[in-house]
Image: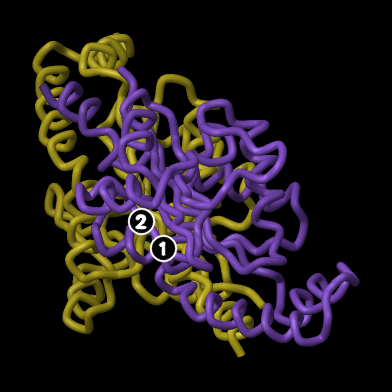
Chain colours: A yellow, B purple
Amino acid sequence: MKNRGILIVLSGPAGTGKGTICKEFLKKNPDTVLSVSATTRSPRPGEQHGMDYYFTTRDDFEKMIAQNGFLEYAEFCENYYGTPIKAVNDKLDEGMNVILEIEVQGAMQIKEKKHDAVFVFIAPPSKKILRERIEGRGTETPAVIEKRMLAAETELKQISNYDYIIVNDDVESAVKRFEAIKEAESYKTTRNEEFIREVCR
Amino acid sequence: MKNRGILIVLSGPAGTGKGTICKEFLKKNPDTVLSVSATTRSPRPGEQHGMDYYFTTRDDFEKMIAQNGFLEYAEFCENYYGTPIKAVNDKLDEGMNVILEIEVQGAMQIKEKKHDAVFVFIAPPSKKILRERIEGRGTETPAVIEKRMLAAETELKQISNYDYIIVNDDVESAVKRFEAIKEAESYKTTRNEEFIREVCR
């Protein structure tokens, strides 16, 4: 008996190490895949269709919006980005867990639709440390740093809309916390209805 | 910064190995203690007041009921059994997690009062295996076995009122599952409000 996979929505400000945690988690958890987004922007050198993104036209993207084909979508810099609902559902039906690494805005769209998703927020240990990490890259102008901090503050205000918070003080520990969350979620009674029916029969 | 401890309500039919899982869990998790119940029954040889039970008089027990002094209580075979609310809250305030190993009936009393508790049900892999375990003790008459199975079936019907289900196919695995649940629960945003206030400031 295999339960349906778990849909995990992962968000957090830029600079919290969300991408690294996700990558390390996926290496160790072959039962979980990362969702591939669709976009109308052009592929960059090296990017592969179906791997990095599903590259699509504006026309096709808007048709899919009209058909409720996205779990969530948004427009940035005149390009659409979205999570195709079918690819995600196919994986979940196979029993695979699916991670959506998306912005708070998209996460809240999914929450409103009441999908049976788990919302995980990756947070910096403190705002001071987040600033140090952003500054530490050494490649940004003060104006860009302030813009990033402001964006981070807006995202941090949404933490309470998430189910879990992982404080990234150390990547390895953060990955372990993420694993505990995934494991515990798989024991939720709501995710084991088939077993419960069976044992009650 | 230390968060408040987690109140964990643990139930499951007799014969599922609930007691063993609990004992092994406590050995490995010094951040967690087992709640001690109050009872009006007489101490059995070797039982210690404050360790096995808080032994009390019928009169005092009823006074505590009147003062809402119990998280849950019930009467079995003309004796009262109950969980004193103050002892539990003191431990939680210290940041310790507290396990209540109680019957479904008591668990549902706590659920109704909307305490911020985590409800964990220990289930046998199947009803057939539960019967084998009960019969396997070799000490029970057929009538007692049937009575136990009937009681188990009544309890199993309540699984959906619990948050998590741990299938006890193997004690070591079951303890690990329990640990994942305890860990994940500690990352719930609702249990980290102080950190969230701090990081948002």
Residue B84's disc is: none
Residue under circle 1?
Answer: B74
The image shows residue A118 at horizontal and vertical percentages of 36, 56
In the rendered view, tell whether residue A17 sits above or below residue A4.
Answer: above
Q: Distance between the residues labelled 2 and 1?
A: 7 Å
The image shows residue B80 at horizontal and vertical percentages of 44, 58
Residue at 32 percent across and 42 percent down: it is B85
Residue under circle 2?
Answer: B72
Quarter that holds the C terminus of chain A: bottom right
In the rendered view, tell whether residue A11 sits above or below residue A90.
Answer: above
Mark 2 Cα within 10 Å, few/some/many (few <14, many 20+)?
many
Residue at 48 percent across and 60 percent down: it is B79
Mark 1 Cα within 10 Å, few/some/many (few <14, many 20+)?
some
Label 1 sits on a secondary structure element that is strand
The image shows residue A23 at horizontal and vertical percentages of 52, 39
The numbered mark 1 sits on a residue in which chain?
B
Between disc 2 and disc 1, the foreground one is 1
The numbered mark 2 sits on a residue in which chain?
B
In the rendered view, tell whether residue A68 sits above or below residue A97.
Answer: below
Quarter that holds the N terminus of chain A: bottom right
The image shows residue A131 at horizontal and vertical percentages of 22, 14
> What's under tag 1, amino acid-wise?
Ala
In terms of depth relative to the viewer, which is nearer, A35 or B122?
B122
